[in-house]
Amino acid sequence: MRSAAGEGRERLLEALFDEFGESGPSPSLSMRQVAERLGVHHTLLTYHFGSRPSLLGAVLSEARRRDNLAIAATGSELGFAPLCRAIWDFYSDAAHEDRTRAFFHLAGLAVYEHNAYQSFVTGLDDLVHTLEAAARRDGHTATEARQQSIIAVSCLRGLLLQRLLTPDAEVDDAAERFLGSLPTSGP
């Protein structure tokens, strides 16, 4: 059973998605400006999210959770390499570019204000855990699966960042080369 506060937070998250999309409000908007757009008092946002960084982190964390569910729905039994492909295909789709930009913006802010974005940072390993499970299904040891997953997520995020900064075919070709180099099964 959820508390009234938890239900209120969920309703606010839905309202944030409805108003601002899955990328959330611009980091340049104040809590008061966000509240005005939602038609609520800014103290309500402060009560449920604490601060602007926490609000932004909550929105992107929820978007990332939804993304992970959509990716997992492509097949919970996918092996490591096909799952990496599904992740790349999902996030490199132009429809997700704004959210990818918001992710990197927030990640950059978290580098400087780690504690302010703690809830966002805490969820960054979700994709690693998803890939780790796929690598284990492929027969890799726990250590191999963890390391392989960290490397893959780091490479995919790096490629996505490079694609945002210099969108050309060379980045997509590099992504194809990386994805093609992944092992299709365990040892």
Image (cartoon, helix red, strand yellow):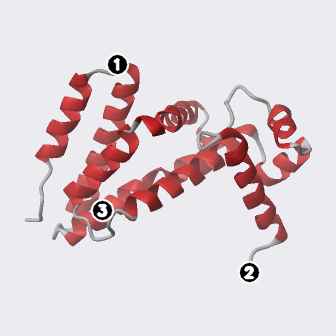
Give the CA distance from mark 3 to mark 2. Answer: 31 Å
Task: Give whichever of 7, 53 is nearer the camera.
Answer: 7
The quarter of the displayed image where residue 162 is located: top left
Provide the secondary structure element on which disc 3 rests. helix
Provide the secondary structure element on which disc 1 rests. loop
Task: Give whichever of 59, 16 is nearer the camera.
Answer: 16
Side of 159 where 13 appears, left or right: right
Give the CA distance from mark 1 to mark 3. Answer: 30 Å
Q: Position of residue 157 (x, y in %)?
A: 36, 38
The residue that appears at 82% across and 65% down in the rendered structure is 5
The quarter of the displayed image where residue 132 is located: bottom left
Q: Which mark is residue 166?
A: 1
Looking at marks 2 and 1 on the same chain, the residue that comes earlier in the sequence is marked by: 2
The residue that appears at 73% across and 60% down in the rendered structure is 10
Furthest residue toward bottom: 1
Q: Which residue is mark 2?
A: 1
Up/down of 173 relative to 61, above or below: above
As shown in the figure, which amino acid type bears the numbered disc 3?
Glu
Q: Position of residue 13 (x, y in %)?
A: 71, 53
Side of 62 where 4 appears, left or right: right
Side of 163 where 145 appears, left or right: left
Which tag is nearer the camera, tag 3 or tag 2? 2
Q: Which residue is mark 3?
A: 132
